[in-house]
Image (spheres, rainbow, N blue to C red):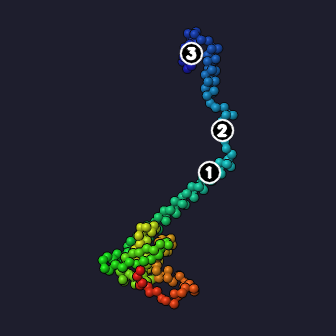
Amino acid sequence: MSDDLRSQLLKTGLVDEKQVRKAKAQKHKARKGNTPKKKDRKAPAEPGVAEARRAEQAERSRQKNREQQERAERRARHAQIRELVTTQLAPIPTGDAALDYHFQQGGQIRHIPVTADLQKRLADGRAAIAGLDIRPEKGFRVIPRETADRIRERDPDWPLVIPAETEADTAPDPDDPYKDYVIPDDLMW
């Protein structure tokens, strides 16, 4: 009861002082009964456990941020390489000038059309074959050797074939019966 109502009821004689105190006590008990008791409340976790959890969460956040940064840097490197490849492309020959140049990449024999001049530059090591994307199925094109070296510096996993390098890396087999026969660089299949 509010003080005004209580005082009015007391003045008119409808309630006495004892009833007012009893109503006040019930109201207080009802209000206090709704709050959880101290025993029911959760005990605060030990400070060491809470700090350990925060440190663990901070470490996970740092690790996640590092991974996101690495992915962003890798995407930026791939974009730079794609830009290098697309700006340095040799034109694709058509018609009678087109010769099929076969090369091995990733365990598969692939071919691209080249001119006689590009074929000679590939054999001499002045040109290389680069993938248009990190995925070889996107296609390959001929680029200058300097560009291929810059690509290899940025990402060694980029699909890149330098024919003069692959021939120099393979040592002849001593048991090969055809080791005395030289295979010409311009051999067409």
Q: Which residue is mark 1?
A: 54
Q: Amino acid at mark 2?
A: Lys
Q: CA distance from mark 1 to mark 3?
A: 56 Å
In the rendered image of this protein, does residue 5 appear above or below residue 171? above
* Residue 175 drawn above or below residue 152: below
Residue at 55%, 57% (x, y): give it. Answer: 64
Q: Of helix, strand and loop, which one carries label 3?
A: helix
**Label 3 packing within 10 angstroms: few (<14), some (14-19), many (20+):** some
> Disc number at residue 42?
2
Q: Which residue is mark 3?
A: 7
Nearest to N terminus: mark 2 or mark 1? 2
Residue 88 can be seen in this image: no
Residue with the most extreme bottom position: 180
Vertically, is 84 above or below 181?
A: above
Task: Answer with left or right where residue 48 lies relative to residue 70.
Answer: right
Q: Work out whether 166 lies above or below 154.
A: below
Query: Residue visible at 48% across and 88% down?
Result: 182
| Label located before the other in sequence (2 or 3) | 3
Determine the residue positioned at 41% across, 70% down: 139
Distance from the alpha carbon under mark 2 to that under mark 3: 42 Å
Tell me the mark number nearer the camera, choosing from 2 and 3.
2
Position in image of residue 188 (x %, y %): 40, 82
Could you tell me the amino acid type at mark 1?
Arg
Tell me the element at label 1. Answer: helix
Identify residue type, mark 3. Ser
Image quarter hosting the C terminus: bottom left
Q: Could you tell me residue 107's position as x and y percent?
A: 50, 72
